[in-house]
Amino acid sequence: MPESSKLALLLVGFGLFIGFWLSSTGKRRFTSRAGMLEYVKVYDFLTRSVRSIPAIELAPGMVAATVPDVSGTVWVDVAQLEEGDYQHPPLALELRERIIQVRDALWEVYPQSIEEWEDGFRRDADPHLEVSIWQHIASTYEALTAARMLSPAEKQDYFNVLVACSMTPREHLFNTVSLAAISRDEAEQAVRVFDES
């Protein structure tokens, strides 16, 4: 008997296997008595391959992305990303002033020079949109932390949650963020503030 058949029989024997199917969004799901387990596609830049993993296995440092020549949204490990080429000339003074405000608001948790910030934005497809996203992160961060006595670790957790909010579907957010100093409830409140402001 082939190994795959033995595995299927084992799953049926334990009453766990009900079925696999492909949803309209391309997500494969496994249904058990415990509920549905969603699968997501993960792209590996090193092997240039896509594989499916249970969404609960998404880890900190993974973000949803669109990869050229790969259909649909996939998850990627940010450690595998390389800087792209510049897509824009040096940014206008108005945009640089907005970047300075972001840098100043986030300096304690993300100490980057104005040159480093601009370098990244010049590589983005739409620097104005990206700066607006970072302004939202910065203003939300200030709203959550300014009037409170928080440790550096707590501030870092809030920052990490807000950055994840800017690029992660909510149902996967807490798989991709590691909390060291704030509670899950505090992190969920930060998500609500981000979404409502």
Image (cartoon, rainbow, N blue to C red):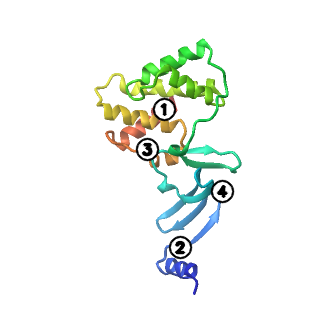
- Cα–Cα span, label 4 and label 1: 28 Å
What separation in Å lies between label 2 and label 1 (alpha carbons)?
A: 39 Å
Identify the residue under disc 3: 177
| Residue 38 quadrant | bottom right
Residue picked out by circle 2: 17
Which of the labelled discs sits on residue 194, or is there none? 1
> What residue sits right under mark 4 in the picture?
26
**Amino acid found under the numbered disc labelled 2:** Phe
3D distance between C-alphas at marks 4 and 3:
24 Å
Mark 4 or mark 1, earlier in chain: 4
SS class, disc 4: loop
Q: Which residue is rendered at x = 48% and y = 56% of the image?
A: 57
User: Which label's residue is closer to the chain start, 2 or 1?
Assistant: 2
* Mark closest to the chain's N terminus, 2 or 4: 2
Among numbered discs 3 and 2, the one appearing first in the sequence:
2
Are discs 2 and 1 less than 8 Å apart at CB? Answer: no
Say whether residue 80 is visible: yes
Q: Nearer the viewer, mark 3 or mark 2?
A: 3
Numbered disc in front, either 3 or 1: 3
Q: Nearer the viewer, residue 100 or 164?
A: 100
